Every structure is written in C-alpha cells, then in structure tokens.
Image (tube, rainbow, N blue to C red):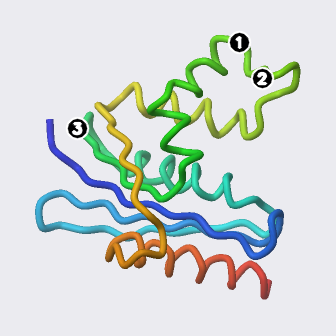
Amino acid sequence: MKNVEIFTDGACKGNPGPGGWGAILRYGSAEKEISGGAADTTNNKMEVTAVIEALRCLKEPCKVTVYSDSTYVCNSMNKGWAKNWEAKNWIKGGKPVPNTELWKQMLELTKLHSVTFVWVKGHDGHPENERCDRLAVAQAEKYKNA
C-alpha cells in the first residue's frame, strides 16, 4: 500500500455561516491541494468534509495519515465515537447525531484505507496546517461574498 499524508482544515465565518475547507494530499514528493466550501455551514461540517474530500481523491487503497487540528474529527475517529454512533443508529443522548450523513461517508471511506488520525495544534506554525487554513479561509470568504 502507498503511504499518503493528508493535512486538513475547516473554517467558518460565523457558526453557522459561510465556510470553507482545505486539504493537502502528499505521496512522496508529489502534492495536491484541494478546497471547497458552502454558503451556510458549520466549522465542524467543514472539518469533516475536508477529510472526506481528501480521501475521495485516492484512487486505490492506501495507508493514510490524516493530520487535523480538529479534536472533533480526531476524537470521533480515534476514540471510536463515530463507530459507536453508527452502532446506536446515529442517536446520541436521545437525539440524532449532528452531521450524520458526513460521518456515514467518513466511515465508508475509512473502510477502503488504513487510516490513522493525528491531532495537530492549529494556528501554531505547522506549515501544512497553516496552508490548509489559508485554503479554507479563502473559500469561506468566497462564499461570504457570493
């Protein structure tokens, strides 16, 4: 399996509000940047979407390390929260789990690959996290002005 690194970030101008996401995929010395956004979204949706869209770019099963400054993403995957939500029919505390459709997509994509999630401190000089933040903020600004 190929070893791929994925760096992601999400941003939102207001929460909810216009938002964006950015990701960098790295295989060896090759890199690809992707980004997108939405007019009315949340920061958490953008964080999860960044990972989903990056994983969708992979054309074959890979060993993937995802670097994210989102404790929501990292804890949901590393601590088994998302799989727990799925096992309980997407109900948590008697209420529907927020962003269920995104989590369903995330779990399906992570079945195709061997994925490890690593939390990085945001806005702390991590070069790829800073680049992803710029991509995400640019998309949020684009949707803010749309």
Query: Mark 2 sits on what residue?
Result: 92
Report the residue at 73% width, 21% height from top.
Answer: 90
Query: Mark 3 sits on what residue?
Result: 63
How many numbered discs sit on the rendered protein?
3
Amino acid type, residue under disc 1 in the picture: Lys
What is the residue that sits farthest to the bottom in this orientation?
Answer: 145
Residue 136 is drawn in which quadrant?
bottom right
Front tag of 2 and 3: 2
The picture places residue 98, in percent across and down from the top left corner, at: 77, 38
Amino acid type, residue under disc 2 in the picture: Lys
> Which residue occupies the foreground of this view, 12 or 71?
71
Q: Which mark is residue 88?
A: 1
Report the residue at 87% width, 25% height from top.
Answer: 95
The picture places residue 21, in percent across and down from the top left corner, at: 57, 66
Amino acid type, residue under disc 3 in the picture: Lys
Compared to residue 28, the image places residue 99 above or below, namely: above
